[in-house]
Image: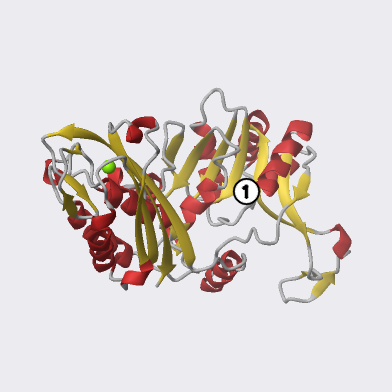
């Protein structure tokens, strides 16, 4: 079973942000959550190693991003990186046979890089992400005089993940502890035992966020995906049952009829479809999420009120509807005489000119539940603009 040890213990002093850099946000998501998310598809569990004062904030961030589950633990770090990794290794469950050790501040790591490390472990027992050196590297003495210029072709800059069998990396840590050896990465502990270490191809984008410039660079990298258009389309569908003793209300118009729609609210099936289209286009869920039918405050409520609420919610998220088209499927009654008022109601609620709103009615030629007058269904589409 694959586990990840995510190191989140740095103080972030070079970042000058006044808090742990893994808690800084990149495009609205904390760095630690981005890093953790990169492993969700490949690893079975995770141990986050953090400073005591950051543990609650990290846990809250992971929970908010839906990344906490029973195989995720947060443990205290040690005095050095090596101690922190050791603390993480100590709490791995017995069924964790392989481990990816990763810097929490390398939140741009991609799945291909991770999988190359994992494949190398399966073949050799170790797999360390690395990239060819682009700069010529000089070896110097204390006075910065050049001692040697190693052949660049033989040099690699090492990143994380650094992946190992759990048995090997535990043994390497124990050996280092016994000899008082302090390595700058985990691979060096295995090297120190005289064992081979396999590097695999990393990624230049897999940078370690260390300084404010790194944040700017990371944001630029995230932004360089092709820009998405500022228009979105949404679709909604709803059905309510026709019963005796209820009003028939469609797009806010009470229509004289022997039957009405059954529901927790006023059961305005057309506005429900429209609201779902609006929430769908903006990825804000659906009306069941915003107005649960178990909540007494929505009992009998006018769906026009709910629509006003959804319009405000979209505005809050910087969206507005640019047009809407609603179809009502009902065998009876004749809806044509009521269509103008329905359009007007929807246009007013959406703050749109009338020619941006369409409401149409159709029958199913007596087929299906609508045709048998057991219920009325409605479908809606709308276009949404980011504002
Ligand atoms: Mg409904």
Q: Quadrant of the N terminus?
A: top right
Residue 329 vertical placement versus 130 (above, below)? above
- Residue placed most toward the observer, 381 or 172: 381
Left-right relation of 11 to 298: right
Nearest to the observer: residue 14 or residue 66: 66
Disc 1 crowd rating (10 Å Cα; few below 14, some 14-19, many 20+) is some
In the rendering, at what x and y percent does residue 15 appear? Answer: 48, 69
Q: How many numbered badges does the structure rendering display? A: 1
Q: Which residue is rendered at x = 83% and y = 70% of the image?
A: 147
The reply, left or right, for residue 43 in relation to residue 275 is right
Q: Residue at x 43, y 55 (%)?
A: 234
- Colour scheme of the picture: secondary structure
Instruction: Please provide percent x and percent y for residue 207.
Output: 62, 61
Q: Secondary structure at mark 1?
A: loop
Q: Position of residue 175 (x, y in %)?
A: 65, 35
Of the 4 image quadrants, the one containing the C terminus is bottom left
Q: Is residue 132 left or right of residue 332?
A: right
Q: Residue at x 56, y 39 (%)?
A: 4
Q: Nearer the viewer, residue 226 or 197?
A: 226
Q: Can residue 9 be seen from the camera position used here?
A: no
For residue 45, say whether it is visible.
yes
State the residue position of label 1: 182
Query: Under 8 Å from ligand 1: the CB of mark 1?
Result: no
Ligand 1, seen in the image, is in the quarter at top left
Corner quadrant of residue 243: top left
Q: Position of residue 70 (x, y in %)?
A: 42, 31
- The part of the image, by quadrant, that contains residue 171 is top right
């Amino acid at each position: 079973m694959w586990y990840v040890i995510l190191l989140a213990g740095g103080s972030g002093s070079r970042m000058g942000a006044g808090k742990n850099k893994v808690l800084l946000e990149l495009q609205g998501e904390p760095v630690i959550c981005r890093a953790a998310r990169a492993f969700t598809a490949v690893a079975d569990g995770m141990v986050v190693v953090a400073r005591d004062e950051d543990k609650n904030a990290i846990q809250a961030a992971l929970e908010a991003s839906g990344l906490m589950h029973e195989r995720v633990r947060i443990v205290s770090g040690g005095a050095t990186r090596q101690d922190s990794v050791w603390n993480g290794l100590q709490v791995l469950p017995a069924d964790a046979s392989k481990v990816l050790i990763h810097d929490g501040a390398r939140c741009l790591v991609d799945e291909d890089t991770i999988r190359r490390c994992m494949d190398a472990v399966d073949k050799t027992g170790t797999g360390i992400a690395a990239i060819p050196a682009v700069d010529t590297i000089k070896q110097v003495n204390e006075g910065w005089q050049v001692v040697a210029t190693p052949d660049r072709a033989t040099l690699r800059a090492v990143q994380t993940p650094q992946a190992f069998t759990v048995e090997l990396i535990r043994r390497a840590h124990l050996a280092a502890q016994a000899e008082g050896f302090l390595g700058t990465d985990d691979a060096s502990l295995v090297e120190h035992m005289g064992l081979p270490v396999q590097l695999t191809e990393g990624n230049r984008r897999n940078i370690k966020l260390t300084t404010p410039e790194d944040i700017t660079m990371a944001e630029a990298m995230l932004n360089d995906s092709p820009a998405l258009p500022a228009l979105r389309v949404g679709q909604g569908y709803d059905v309510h049952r026709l019963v005796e003793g209820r009003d028939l209300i469609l797009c806010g118009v009470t229509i004289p009829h022997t039957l009405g729609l059954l529901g927790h609210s006023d059961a305005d099936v057309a506005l429900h479809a429209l609201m779902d289209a609006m929430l769908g286009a903006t990825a804000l869920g659906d009306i069941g999420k915003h107005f649960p039918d178990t909540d007494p405050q929505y009992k009998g409520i006018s769906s026009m009120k709910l629509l006003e609420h959804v319009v405000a919610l979209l505005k809050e998220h910087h969206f507005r509807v640019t047009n809407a088209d609603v179809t009502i499927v009902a065998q009876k009654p004749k809806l044509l005489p009521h269509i103008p008022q329905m359009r007007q109601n929807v246009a007013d609620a959406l703050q749109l000119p009338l020619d941006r709103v369409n409401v149409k009615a159709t029958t199913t030629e007596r087929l299906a539940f609508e045709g048998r007058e057991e219920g009325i269904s409605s479908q809606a589409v709308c276009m949404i603009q980011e504002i």
